[in-house]
Image (cartoon, helix red, strand yellow):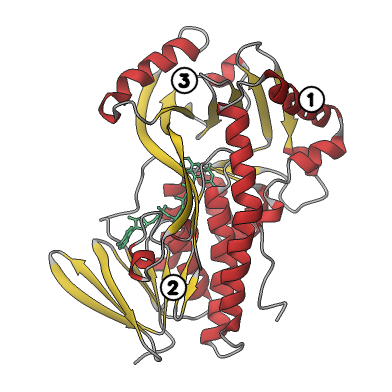
Amino acid sequence: MNNSKVIVVGAGPVGLITALGLARSGIEVTVLEREPAVVSSPRAMVYHSGVISGIEKLGLLDDALESGFTAGDLDFLVHSTGERISLNISALEGLVPHPYNLHLGQDRLAGIALEHLWRLPGADVRFGTAVTALTQDADGATVTAESGGTPVEFRAGWVVGADGAGSAVRRQLGLELEGMTWPERFVATNIRFDYGRHGFASANMVIDPQYGAIVARITGDGLWRCTFCEDASLPEETVAERIAAYFAETLPGDKDYELVQFSPYRMHQRAAATFRVGRVLLAGDAAHVTNPTGGLGLTSGLFDAFVLSEAMAAVVHGQIGDEVLDRYAEERRRVFLEAASPQASAFKQLVYNSADPAVLEQALTGLRAAAADVDLQRKQMTVSQPLETPSLVARA
Ligand SMILES: Cc1cc2nc3c(=O)[nH]c(=O)nc-3n(C[C@H](O)[C@H](O)[C@H](O)COP(=O)(O)OP(=O)(O)OC[C@H]3O[C@@H](n4cnc5c(N)ncnc54)[C@H](O)[C@@H]3O)c2cc1C
């Protein structure tokens, strides 16, 4: 039995970055991924300045900057009146190491982490390997997976479940994702349309109870994300028709756009009852899911990955007792429930559910004040700060 080995389930960004953190600390790590390659569906693409130091620490920042781009401009656009309130993260200049957000498709971030992981000794990634069962005992855990129709078994001292919202690992632990599901369906689209020419910032929250959307630039060559929402009772098969109707109504100018990719999603505010059961830890969407307004989902998952990989490496190397993993589980769950989830819900309510004029006016008054006052703007632009957990090893 090799107690020093770790299995990470899921080669999403959280799994790969956790595996990279472990492998860089000299831990033997195997990543098991159900799909044949990194999943490329349109999801996260904006990372708050707070996670960039962690990306840098893992040696990924140069490649991430080369593949994506940095931006700091965020506009709140009131669809009904055309009012635009502009904030800029450059207000944080001199106060944080990276006073910008990183725009980069999460499949690219995962791809970069994978390239770095392949180069490290002791790191193994098995695509097309779907985990189906998990058992554990005093010495370690046994993971059963299916690969090419054949059952395969893996054994390790520790397992990290980073297999997303439908996590097989979490189900094997008998844990539910507790919380609520929103009545709306989100529709994420990647389109080629020159929003920038029409005055849009790199990131925009378009506020409207009917046409609310997040609009953000994905690449420097004209690819943008527009995520709007619709009643989840509408048939999913006809979502493409409603995408056309949405853009006919909302795009400025000649409306000449190309739809590159789209995907409908149900949205939740949910967390597992615990993020640790014995030798198995949960991270990222396997542990907690939020609606994506404000870009706090993967941001939370990356903060999990940074702190978990460091703590687990210290445990495996015998530098610290495994109680540190209980602290990971408690602290990351608390942070999600007390900071990430309420903040993401507030953003969603503002963007998509702003039907009450008095509530909207109150929110806009706060944003106008922030646009005019650098201290208030700094506060507004550090929403991800409470999501971070400082090193648990350094504090031990
Ligand atoms: C429209 C949209 C926009 C978003 N935008 C942002 C944003 O801008 N910023 C932000 O921070 N967050 C955003 N999010 C949230 C973000 O996408 C998620 O938080 C992120 O994907 C979580 O990463 P993960 O690695 O935990 O899980 P995932 O990305 O879901 O990866 C899980 C991996 O596990 C694999 N897997 C699943 N089951 C098994 C199994 N049984 N065996 C082996 N492998 C398995 C899957 O194939 C997948 O590769 C957005 C979400 C959506 C839907």
Q: Residue 382's x, y, as percent?
A: 73, 46
Label 2–label 1 contact, CB within 8 A: no
Q: Judging from the image, what secondary structure is the residue with disc 1 in?
A: helix
Q: As shown in the figure, which amino acid type bears the numbered disc 2?
A: Leu
Of circles 1 and 3, the one toward us is: 1
Of circles 3 and 2, the one toward us is: 3
Dividing the image into 4 quarters, which one contains the N terminus?
Answer: bottom left
Mark 1–mark 3 Cα distance, whole angstroms, equals 31 Å
Label 1–label 3 contact, CB within 8 A: no
Task: Determine whether 261 is above or below 314 in the image.
Answer: above
Q: Residue 285's x, y, as percent?
A: 46, 55
- The residue carrying pointer 2 sits among few (fewer than 14), some (14 to 19) or many (20 or more) residues within 10 Å by Cα, namely some
Q: Nearer the viewer, residue 388 or 237?
A: 237
Mark 3–mark 2 Cα distance, whole angstroms, equals 40 Å
Q: Residue furthest top?
A: 254
Q: Is residue 145 left or right of residue 54?
A: left
| Lower sequence index among marks 3 and 2 | 2
Q: Residue 130's x, y, as percent?
A: 25, 63
Q: As shown in the figure, which amino acid type bears the numbered disc 3?
A: Phe
Q: Which residue is mark 1?
A: 365
Q: Residue at x 63, y 67 (%)?
A: 331
Dividing the image into 4 quarters, which one contains the C terminus?
Answer: bottom right
Q: Residue 20's x, y, as percent?
A: 48, 68
Q: Which residue is mark 3?
A: 193
Q: Residue at x 37, y 90 (%)?
A: 2
Task: Determine whether 255 is above or below 276 in the image.
Answer: above
Residue 120 tag number: 2
